Structure formats: C-alpha cells, structure tokens
Image (spheres, rainbow, N blue to C red):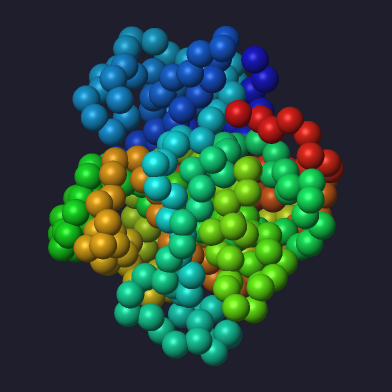
C-alpha cells in the first residue's frame, strides 16, 4: 500500500478541540477515523451518524488517504469574495451564485488531475474552503445551518476554462467543472474549525499563487447553507465549495498543485502528463 506524499500535508494535531476526520484505504479495504499525531483512530459506524472508536489505531504512513467525503451533491459558488468582485468589477451578490459539480469529479489527496483527452485548452486551479454538511437541512435559518455544518475541508475547484466560455449563448459551468478528477477534496475534514481565522493558500510547483483570507467571504458559510436549503434539501455528506479569490491561473501537465488551509492540511495533486488510469 503506497502511503502517498499527501500524508505529509497533515499535521495530525488537534487545535482548539478540533478533530481531523479522514477516510483511508489499506489492503484493499477502506475505513475512516480521526487523525492525531500521525495516527488514525479507526471508527465503526458512519462518519455523519452513529460511530465509535473500533479500538484499532493505524499509522498514517501505512495507508493511502482518500477524499474524506464522497458527496451526493457537490456545489460550488462564484463571486463570493470581496477582493475578487472588486477586481472583476462585479456586483456583490445577496444570494449564492452557484453551480453543480459532478460527484464523479471527486478525487482525494495525491490523485492525478487528468483533463479529458479531447480537451486541449486551459485548466485552472481554484483553491477553496469547503463546507461539509453533517445532517439533513431544509429551509433552515442560519442557526440551523450552523448546526448542520459538520466541518470544513480543502477543495480544488478545477475548471476547463475553454469549455466554460465556448458558447457565448450559454456559459457551461457544470460541464467545465465536472470532468473526472476535477474535484479534489481533502486531506481531512476539520471539526471545531474557526473558518474566520483561516487563509487559503495555493502553490504551483512550490510557488505560492493564491493566499487570501476566508474572512473576506461575501456570504458566510452559515448564510450559504441557510439560503441553499431554502431551495433544496442538503444531505449529510454534501459539500459546498465557498468560492475562490484572486490568483487563479492555468496549470500545465506535470505541475504539482497544493491547496493549504492551516488546521485542515495540504491537498496535494499532480496534473497528469497524459490521460492515464485515474487513482481512486
């Protein structure tokens, strides 16, 4: 079992009563649990329901980390940061401007990002804070929305830019963002996480390209969840990417892209040189 370089992106420390929840693969089986000090305490049950420690402890270096959640709905936001809105000259929205990414786009730490063989255009990274829903919510106020948030993770909202703008009569948000492997999530879900103190940083081949505060969000996580729940039921395990800010650029084949959020870890992926078989 390969341990994967992404393991190094997790500190394995609990901060301010936080817990880091991970999913992992080992010897052909998958499991989940909490990570601290380089060791996973495996759990039985379900992450978003009843669960308890199984008594097994698993060294992080002996497993391969998976995406910490496989959402039924994967929602992304556009124009949700003041700095980017000012740069683009767009108005400040009072409702989420959202799109759907295919759940099949989801991959975890160290998985390759593999653009479709038929696509030759630009592929962008977008480092984002991701909300993970922990319980079903429909038509909830902000207090109910806050209670429905299980925790937070890192997301790379990969985008095929030339597809997005290919037809001037119909911006193709879902298609441009739903290609297989275009939804890296991870490396963990942090509970007890203070998003207002977080910064989202993205590096390409070690060179920092994005570094912005989550506190610059136009709509807060609880506000986002509340407003979305008025129109659709959000289910446990659904993921909402909060949008990105300035610094988005194209990636080239062979590049390593790292989305780092202190307290969550580093989500590290490589852009494939060619359309190889995709890691699970």
Task: Please report the residue visible at 44 percent of the width from the left and 31 percent of the height from the top.
Answer: 22
Tell me which residue sits at (28%, 50%) in the image: 234
Camera sees residue 210: yes
Residue drawn 67% across and 20% down? 2
Q: Position of residue 12 (x, y in %)?
A: 47, 33
Q: Quadrant of residue 230?
A: bottom left
How far from the left and from the top, in percent, is residue 167?
A: 66, 73
The correct choice, above or below, for 81 with respect to 123 in the image is below
Q: Quadrant of the N terminus?
A: top right
Residue 91 quadrant = bottom left
Residue 145 rendering spot, x and y as whole percentages: 21, 56
Displayed quadrant of residue 249: bottom right
Q: Is residue 190 visible?
A: no
When the figure is inspected, residue 145 is found, relative to residue 83, above or below; the finding is above
Q: In the current view of this chain or complex, which residue is farthest to the front? A: 169
| Residue name at image x 51 percent, y 13 percent | 29
Assign the C terminus to one quadrant of the image: top right
Is 198 displayed left or right of 272 in the figure? left
Left or right, residue 109 beside residue 13: right
* Count of marks overlaid on the render: 0
Left or right of 139 in this view: 6: right
């Amino acid at each position: 079992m390969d341990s994967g370089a992404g393991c190094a992106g997790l500190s394995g420390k609990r901060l301010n009563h936080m817990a880091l929840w991970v999913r992992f693969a080992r010897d052909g089986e998958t499991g989940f649990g909490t990570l601290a000090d380089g060791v996973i305490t495996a759990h039985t049950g379900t992450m978003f329901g009843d669960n308890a420690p199984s008594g097994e402890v698993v060294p992080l270096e002996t497993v391969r980390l998976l995406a910490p959640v496989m959402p039924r709905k994967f929602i992304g936001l556009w124009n949700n940061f003041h700095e980017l809105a000012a740069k683009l000259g767009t108005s400040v929205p009072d409702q989420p401007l959202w799109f759907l990414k295919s759940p099949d786009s989801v991959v975890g730490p160290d998985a390759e990002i593999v653009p479709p063989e038929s696509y030759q255009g630009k592929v962008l990274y977008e480092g984002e804070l991701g909300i993970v829903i922990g319980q079903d919510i429909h038509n909830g106020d902000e207090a109910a929305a806050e209670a429905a948030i299980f925790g937070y993770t890192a997301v790379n909202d990969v985008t095929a830019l030339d597809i997005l703008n290919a037809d001037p009569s119909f911006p193709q948000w879902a298609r441009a963002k739903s290609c297989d492997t275009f939804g890296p999530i991870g490396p963990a879900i942090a509970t007890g996480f203070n998003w207002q103190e977080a910064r989202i940083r993205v590096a390409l081949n070690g060179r920092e390209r994005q570094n912005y505060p989550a506190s610059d969000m136009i709509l807060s996580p609880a506000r986002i969840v509340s407003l979305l729940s008025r129109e659709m039921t959000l289910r446990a395990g659904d993921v909402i990417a909060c949008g990105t800010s300035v610094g988005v650029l194209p990636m080239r084949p062979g590049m390593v892209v790292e989305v780092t959020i202190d307290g969550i870890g580093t989500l590290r992926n490589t852009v494939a040189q060619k359309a190889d078989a995709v890691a699970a």
